[in-house]
Structure formats: structure tokens, C-alpha cells
Image: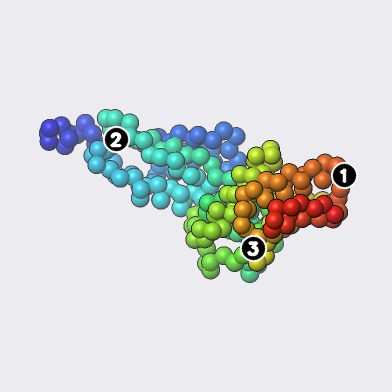
């Protein structure tokens, strides 16, 4: 048995990338060789005993838009890196810098605020159009590929995303998300009407009802005013 486990048959000889996302806007098949190189795989090592955590970290730091779902062992001596492309969820402007993050609070890109515009061809449209998050402060000296360590904010952003998806809408349809003392304010582009939600207790329930009422108001031609979800869950459009 020991002879089998230490056999050269199981020495890692090749790695390939499998993109699970269709219609990617940043990553492409042309990045495959660079992704593999950045992974710094231990060729010649025994695939049976390999832990690919370090390789995953290397890839995700070098390619911020890459999310490695897993590294699959393809016996006897190959590995496949399965990747999806991360999507911008919001941006934060802080000290003249724009930080673009996804819903895992991974920093996808960092640009000077004066370069955050439609003429910047290095940023995909989804990054330029993601809503601005107000009312929070990011850690200092964040760079692309790093994560902001804020567990409660992750829960909040994912909650917002999920409840928008439940009514067939996207976080990218919002222009601003403001968090103020556990109250939440949402606006869409080209509208003066906004959604205000009191408190984060039962937020999941209040979000889906609030978003449904908000987008219904917009569909009905209301362009100014407020959709207010009270702490009790009562909704008022005014």
C-alpha cells in the first residue's frame, strides 16, 4: 500500500482551469495560463496529499474577480481549478478612492475617484454601475484582492441581494444604499423616490415587502416621495 501511495504515478504533472461562469466581463480563457502560474502549484508533489488552500489564495489575490470554487484532483496526476467570476455589489468612496466590492466584501478594484467614470475601459460596466454604499467606513489601506472583515455587513448585503432577486430585481438597479443607525435608505437612478426601512430586526421580511412596494410605486409612475417601512412592518407610500 505504501508503495502505491508514494508512486510517481500520483505526482502532479498538469493543471487546467475550468470557468463555470458564462458571459464573463473581466476574466477569459486567455487568463488560464496566468492563473495557473500565479497559483504556484507544486508540480512533482504527490496529488494524494496536497492541500490546495495556498494555491487558491494565490489565485484570488492575483485575480480579484476570480472566485475559486474548488480545485479538483483528476487522478492520477492532474488538477482542475474551477472558477466563477465575482460580481460587483457596491462601491465605497473614501478619502478620494473608490473601492469596488462584491457581496463577500472582497475588493475587486481600487481606483482614484476621478477615474471612476464611463471612459475607464479597465472597469466593466457592472463595476461602474454598482450602487454607492453610504454610512460605513472600510479598513485602511485595502488593496485589490483583499477582503474587508465585517461579518454583519456581509449578512446585510447578501440579504439585500437575495430579497431583490426574489422579486426579479438586481442590486445593480440601485444607485445608493445608505445605512444610518440601523435604518436603511435605498434609491434608484433617475428617481427622487426612495425606500426607507426602520431597524434591522426582521430585516429579511421588511426588505422583500419594502422592495416590492418600492418598485411597484416606480412602475406606477411615482418619481418623488418615500416608501417607508416602519419597525412594525407597516408600509406607507407618500
Residue displayed at 54% across by 59% down: 152
Across and down, in percent, residue 223 comes to: 86, 50
Residue displayed at 58% across by 43% down: 26
Question: Circle 2: is it few (<14), some (14-19), or many (20+) Cα within 10 Å?
Answer: some
Mark found first going from the N terminus, 3 or 2: 2
Picture disc at residue 114: none
Mark found first going from the N terminus, 3 or 1: 3
Residue displayed at 15% across by 32% down: 4
Across and down, in percent, residue 98 comes to: 63, 60
Judged from the image, the secondary structure of the residue bearing numbered disc 2 is loop
Residue displayed at 26% across by 38% down: 47
Across and down, in percent, residue 81 comes to: 41, 38
Snapshot quadrant of residue 229:
bottom right
Question: Circle 3: is it few (<14), some (14-19), or many (20+) Cα within 10 Å?
Answer: few
**One can see residue 128 in this view:** no
Image position of 172 with respect to 115: above or below: above
Q: Which residue is mark 2?
A: 13
Q: Which residue is mark 3?
A: 182
Are the residues flagged by discs 3 and 1 in contact, CB closer than 8 Å?
no
Q: Quadrant of the N terminus?
A: top left
- 115 vs 140, left or right, is right
- 134 vs 158, left or right, is right
Q: Which residue is mark 1?
A: 221
Judged from the image, the secondary structure of the residue bearing numbered disc 1 is loop
Nearer to us of marks 3 and 2 is 3
State how far apart marks 2 and 1 are (Cα).
62 Å
- 153 vs 232, left or right, is left
Amino acid at each position: 500500500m505504501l508503495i502505491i501511495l508514494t508512486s510517481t504515478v500520483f505526482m502532479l504533472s498538469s493543471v487546467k482551469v475550468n470557468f463555470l461562469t458564462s458571459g464573463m466581463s473581466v476574466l477569459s480563457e486567455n487568463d488560464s495560463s496566468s492563473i495557473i502560474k500565479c497559483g504556484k502549484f507544486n508540480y512533482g508533489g504527490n496529488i494524494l496529499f496536497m492541500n490546495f488552500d495556498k494555491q487558491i489564495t494565490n489565485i484570488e489575490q492575483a485575480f480579484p474577480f476570480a472566485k475559486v470554487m474548488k480545485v479538483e484532483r483528476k487522478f492520477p496526476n492532474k488538477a482542475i481549478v474551477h472558477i466563477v467570476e465575482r460580481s460587483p455589489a457596491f462601491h465605497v468612496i473614501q478619502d478620494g478612492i473608490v473601492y469596488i466590492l462584491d457581496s463577500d466584501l472582497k475588493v475587486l478594484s481600487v481606483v482614484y475617484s476621478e477615474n471612476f467614470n464611463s471612459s475607464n475601459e479597465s472597469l466593466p460596466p457592472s463595476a461602474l454601475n454598482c450602487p454607492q454604499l453610504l454610512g460605513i467606513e472600510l479598513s485602511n489601506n485595502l488593496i485589490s484582492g483583499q477582503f474587508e472583515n465585517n461579518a454583519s455587513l456581509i449578512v446585510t448585503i447578501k440579504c439585500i441581494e437575495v430579497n431583490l432577486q426574489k422579486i426579479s430585481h438586481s442590486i445593480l438597479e440601485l444607485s445608493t444604499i445608505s445605512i444610518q443607525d440601523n435604518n436603511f435608505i435605498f434609491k434608484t437612478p433617475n428617481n427622487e423616490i426612495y425606500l426607507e426601512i426602520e431597524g434591522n430586526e426582521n430585516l429579511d421580511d421588511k426588505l422583500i415587502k419594502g422592495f416590492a412596494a418600492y418598485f411597484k410605486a416606480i412602475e406606477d409612475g411615482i418619481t418623488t416621495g418615500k416608501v417607508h417601512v416602519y419597525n412594525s412592518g407597516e408600509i406607507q407610500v407618500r
